[in-house]
C-alpha cells in the first residue's frame, strides 16, 4: 500500500532519518520499533506530511505523494494518531468525534453520523457514558480510545499509530491492543510505532527496527521475536520489556 524510499530528514545538524526505506503491506499490521530517539516519530510525521525530507520519496497506492500537503493525505485515507493524545480537550467527547467524522467527508447525512457514533459507543461504552464531558477530563486510557475512534471515523485506508501504549496502565494497553487486533482482522492496514518491541510484535505481521535514524533489521514478527528472545537486539534496542 505504501512505500518509503531512501528518506533523509534533518533537524539542522541532526540527521533524524538516514536513507530509510520500507514497505507497509495492505490488510495487516506493520511495526516500526526502536529505542526512544531512534526516529520513529519523525518517520510517521514524514508519512503524514508534517515534516519535509531533504531527500527521498513516498509512494501511496503506486502514486508519489511526497509533495502532497497533510490535508490531501488525510482526504485520501491516511489517518495519524499522534503521540501525546492530541485532542480538542476543551470540547466534548461527542464533538471531538463529530469533527473527525466530518473532516474527510464534510457533508455527511445525520443518519450516517448517528450510525458511526453508535458503532464507537457500542465498542467503548465508557465513551458514551462520558460523551458530554470535555475530552480533557478523561483518563489517559480513555483519551487514547477516543483519539483512535476519532481517527477511524474518517474511514482511513491506512492508520498510523505513534506509541499508543505510552503512559497507559497495562489493563488499558491490553484493551487498546485488543481493539487493534480486531481492526486487523477486519482488514485494516495499520502502521504502528512502539518502543516496547514485544508489545508491537504481539500483533504485527512484519516489522522494522530503527536505530539512530536507520533501518538495521527487518523481518516477519516471528523472526524479530526470536531476535528479542536471544538478546541480539539488546545493543540497539532498550525497550524489551513485556506488559
Image: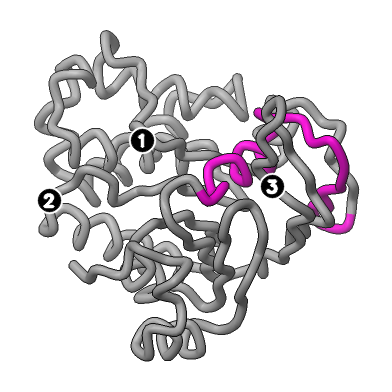
Residue 115 lies in quadrant: top left
Q: Residue 17 carries which label?
A: 3
203 to the left or right of 49: left
- How far across and down, in percent of the image, does residue 174 sit? 20, 62
Q: Is residue 38 above or below residue 241?
A: above
- Residue occupied by mark 2: 169
Mark 2–mark 1 Cα distance, whole angstroms, equals: 17 Å
In the image, the segment drawn in magenta is: 38-62
Q: Which residue lies furthest to the top in this view?
A: 90
Q: Residues within 10 Å of mark 2 (few under 14, many from 20)?
A: few
SS of the residue at dot 3? strand
Q: Which residue is drawn at 45% across and 86% down?
A: 227
- Residue occupied by mark 1: 147
SS of the residue at dot 2? loop
Mark 1–mark 3 Cα distance, whole angstroms, equals: 27 Å
Out of 62 and 16, give the one closest to the viewer.
16
Q: Which residue is drawn at 83% across and 55% down?
A: 6
Q: How crowded is mark 1: few (under 14 residues within 10 Å), some or many (20 or more)?
A: many
As for residue 61 lying within the magenta part, the answer is yes
Out of 121 and 42, give the one closest to the viewer.
42
- How far across and down, in percent of the image, does residue 61 sit? 81, 57
Circles 2 and 1: CB atoms closer than 8 Å: no
- Mark 2 or 1, nearer chain start: 1
- Mark 2 or 3, nearer chain start: 3
Amino acid at each position: 500500500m505504501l512505500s518509503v524510499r531512501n528518506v533523509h530528514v534533518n533537524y539542522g545538524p541532526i540527521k533524524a532519518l538516514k536513507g530509510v526505506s520500507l514497505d507497509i503491506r495492505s490488510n495487516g499490521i506493520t511495526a516500526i520499533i526502536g529505542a526512544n530517539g531512534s526516529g520513529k516519530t519523525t518517520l510517521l510525521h514524514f508519512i503524514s506530511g508534517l515534516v519535509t525530507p531533504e531527500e527521498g520519496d513516498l509512494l501511496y497506492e503506486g502514486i508519489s505523494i511526497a509533495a502532497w500537503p497533510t490535508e490531501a493525505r488525510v482526504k485520501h485515507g491516511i489517518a495519524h494518531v499522534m503521540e501525546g493524545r492530541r485532542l480538542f480537550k476543551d470540547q466534548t467527547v461527542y464533538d471531538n468525534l463529530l469533527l473527525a467524522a466530518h473532516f474527510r467527508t464534510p457533508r455527511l447525512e445525520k443518519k450516517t453520523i448517528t450510525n458511526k457514533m453508535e458503532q464507537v459507543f457500542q465498542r467503548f461504552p465508557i465513551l458514551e457514558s462520558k460523551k458530554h464531558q470535555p475530552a480533557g477530563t478523561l483518563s489517559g486510557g480513555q483519551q487514547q480510545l477516543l483519539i483512535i475512534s476519532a481517527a477511524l471515523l474518517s474511514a482511513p485506508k491506512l492508520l498510523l499509530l505513534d506509541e499508543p501504549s505510552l503512559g497507559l496502565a497495562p489493563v488499558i494497553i491490553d484493551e487498546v491492543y485488543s481493539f487493534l487486533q480486531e481492526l486487523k482482522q477486519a482488514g485494516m492496514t495499520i502502521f504502528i510505532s512502539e518502543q516496547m518491541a514485544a508489545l508491537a510484535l504481539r500483533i504485527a505481521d512484519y516489522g522494522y527496527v530503527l536505530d539512530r535514524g536507520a533501518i538495521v533489521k527487518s523481518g516477519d514478527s516471528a523472526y524479530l521475536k526470536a531476535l528479542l528472545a536471544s538478546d541480539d537486539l539488546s545493543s540497539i534496542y532498550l525497550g524489551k520489556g513485556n506488559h
